Amino acid sequence: MSGQLKPGQGPLEYGRRRWLQSLFAVTLMVLYLPIAVLVAFSFNEQNRGGVWKGFTFENYPKAWANQSIYDAMVNSLTIAVITTLFATVIGTMVAVMMWRFRFPLKPAYEAAMGLPIVIPEICMGVALLLFFNGTGLMGFFSNLVWPFNLATIIIAHIAFCFPFVAIVVRSRLVGFNKQLEEASRDLGANEWQTFWQVLVPYMKPGIISGALLAFTLSLDDFVITFFTSGPETVTFPVKIYSMVKTGVKYEVNAASTILIVITILATVLAMKLQAPEKSGH
Amino acid sequence: MPDPIVSVRNVSRRYPGGVTAVDNVSVDIMPNEFFALLGPSGCGKTTLLRMISGLDAPSEGHIYIGGEDMALTPPNKRPTNMVFQSYAVFPHMTVSENVAYGLKVTGVPADETKRRVAEALEQVKLTHLADRKPDQMSGGQRQRVALARALVKRPKVLLLDEPLSALDAKLRDDMRLELTRLQQEVGITFIIVTHDQDEALSMATRIAVMEKGSIRQLATPEELYEHPTSRFVADFIGKVNLFDADVVSQKGKAVICNAKGLGKMNLTTDRTCGKQVTIAVRPEKLKLSKTAPKAEGLIKAEAKVRDVAYYGDWSEVVVELANGQMVSVNVQNDKRDGSILGINRGEKTFVSWNPADSLVLTE
């Protein structure tokens, strides 16, 4: 390495190194080109085969009109919304508990909390399947009316989503000035009022971004859903998978594009809310 | 004598692990006092304040506020309010929401809340910023929000934890006057915790100097400064020259001491001295002169000028006695000729003072 810089080059301007630029380009291409193609072909006129025939919006109404895609989408959204509600409440409570209290085996507990994040999805899927079958819960729930027949999937989703919420909210709480809580108590608020009027507003950005994270995770989960769904229930990602197996129709592209848009919107919103405030305390 | 508003009786606070933050403290604070708890960090002054507020609980002893035992009263039910060191202004609320908070959570009617909030903001001169969020405000302004938020509750006692420590020097002076004005205006008891002796001396009516969890001396500012009872207090409050001395004899109040570097001297004290005492004298009580002072009865010694620190209106001259002890002398710069009696580093000088200005400290 020569320490020589070319004229007009700063020491940290890696963006100007050619080999880095190409690496960057390749990475972007591998990651995003397939998605771009998928989105582009959702506007293709011809229904099959990888040839561009012309621009159309046709595929979107077609996908919408397809009853099985529609049902799968409704299932997925229902699961995602219910999962988000539960995962957010449980995750926030876990975060507050880990932040506030000291108790025996806390490190072990904290590690166990994070397990669903690191454990391979396939293992979790199989384990949950065995659990639901073994306890007879699978049979019990799949005979119930909609949306209760989604319960096994929802339970599984809550189990792997709430640690994400807990982690996001927990990291938000690190910056909390405990004197705010004391000030609230000192000014006449009881613990319940203090929790709702001081702590919750402080956690709010964390709670919302955690919720959006849980929502997107639940919405596009395939592996765990595949294992824990009853015989009759189909979610959106599972539906797409089965459609792809029988040859790609551009309806699938259209439906997938919608899923991507929902996911990106939620993620952008989550990141916005997680961004640190301009001035701290 | 009126009944004390706050009465601390034999209070101790021990933490698990054997640390004693407050050790058997008893103190009575009178209505309308501006009371200061002064001491170095870790002396237990903040812990004592937190116990009065209810945010911490004594391990032993009792705290009475307005004659009532507070042992089972949580902080939200006590007639005290606190101004926190970090101000602890709620970041998600505007100024007026912050001030209204304490009234809202206790169910004060909306119209009364509105009136009292306006009144409190007026008191701290923040009316024009009522709709601001705290992150758009300076430290001094946030401090005023914290003050208004506490005062609007009309507490019997206002507790202030190091209220000026985070402000810059100029603002600190303004706020000091402001606090004294407010205290006289609202007529409630202020208890302030501070490590800054200037703050305590200039604002408080009485000061409790704390060390290692105990109160070393409780007195008015003048008395603390001129009549400290211990070496610790003399040294902590203001600057002081301390001389170790042997007691030659004591007859009633008259005591003859032999101080290192100064020789024999006749002093007076109310205390019974042991064999060893410390003689203390404040730098501004000392005089410097080029020739040996002629007046009778002064304590005097020859010295060499070691250092001169210039502060504008006064200078601190450090001189070295024959035995090597350093002595600080404050000199008023009341002439414009730029020289302090022509004193320069390394020159010979005489230091002298009136024996009545020295103190005999037995502890």
Image: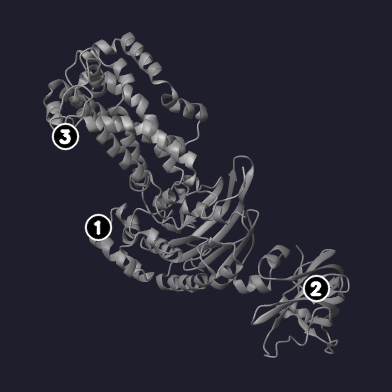
Tell me: B315 left or right of B245.
Answer: left
Mark 2 secondary-structure assignment: loop
Do the residues bearing badges 1 and 2 touch, measured as CB atoms within 8 Å?
no
Quarter of the picture containing the C terminus of chain A is bottom left
* Label 2 CA crowd tier, 10 Å (few <14, some 14–19, many 20+): few
- Label 3, label 2: how many angstroms apart (C-alpha)? 113 Å
Q: Which mark is residue B109?
A: 1
Tell me: B277 left or right of B179.
Answer: right
- Residue type at mark 1 is Pro
Q: Give the mark toward the camera: 1 or 2.
A: 1
Q: Which mark is residue A55?
A: 3
Judging depth in this view, the residue of B295 and B87 nearest the camera is B87
Mark 3 secondary-structure assignment: loop
Task: Give the residue number, with chain letter if any, for mark 2.
Answer: B252
- Residue type at mark 3 is Phe
Q: How far from the left and from the top, in percent, is residue B301?
A: 85, 79
